[in-house]
Image: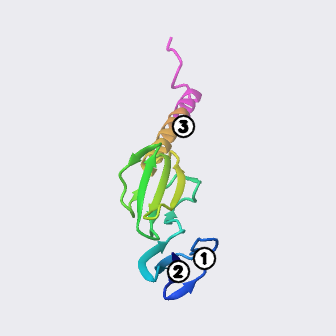
Amino acid sequence: GFEKAIVNGEEKRLNYGTLELFDDGVYEVGVVVNGKVYNFVVTVDGTAPTLVISGVENGGSTKGSVGLSDLSEKADMKVYKNDTEISYTLGESISEEGVYKVILTDECGNVTEYTFEILHSMNSGAVSLIIIGIMFVAGMAILIVSMRKKGKFGKKKA
């Protein structure tokens, strides 16, 4: 029957028949059964992957662009815009209006989820055109008022 467990060359006591490995890492485990040693490698990974979000806080919103970078470990990354998966390459800038969800899953199944929203924002060209339009309308109104005061506009000739 079972005799002992060896972890990284050190004999380990079992806790009610369970070998407990609490820290993340790679372990060389040996199990001695009927005098024969069975060796295998165990990877313990309880840490979920992370990344850096720039331009917005996780769970927040912005009118600017958002960047995703610095993935902490090898992981599958899925990016959703308004609940539809989109194509995304780490490092690209995201600037389209919408609600985004980023899901990272590492090889051991640990998952991290980020969410953010990009709000509608007019670009500077549109804002400039609106300001010019308002100035034009205001200028025309001032011109009409001053011409009326001088009697050159809006009176019928007899």
Q: Which mark is residue 75?
A: none
Q: Which residue carries the number 2 mark?
A: 5
Q: Are marks 2 and 1 in contact (CB under 8 Å)?
A: yes
Q: Residue at x 53, y 80 (%)?
A: 3
Q: Secondary structure at mark 2?
A: strand
Question: Of 125 and 116, which appears nearest the observer?
Answer: 116
For mark 3, does the 10 Å Cα neighbourhood hold few (<14), some (14 to 19), or many (20 or more) residues? Answer: few
157 magenta-colored = yes
Q: Secondary structure at mark 1?
A: loop
Q: Which mark is residue 14?
A: 1
Q: Residue at x 38, y 48 (%)?
A: 86
Whether residue 2 is visible, yes or no, is: yes
Q: Which residue type does callout 1 highlight?
A: Leu
Q: Secondary structure at mark 3?
A: helix
Q: Which residue occupies the extreme bottom position in the image? A: 9
Whole-Å distance between the Cαs marked 3 and 2? Answer: 86 Å
Query: Where residue 99 sits: x, y (%)?
Result: 51, 46
Query: Where residue 28 sits: x, y (%)?
Result: 45, 81
Q: Which residue occupies the extreme right position in the image? A: 16
Earlier-in-chain disc, 1 versus 3: 1
Residue bounds of the magenta highlight: 142-158
In the displayed structure, 9 sits above or below 110; it is below
In the displayed structure, 44 sits above or below 67; it is below
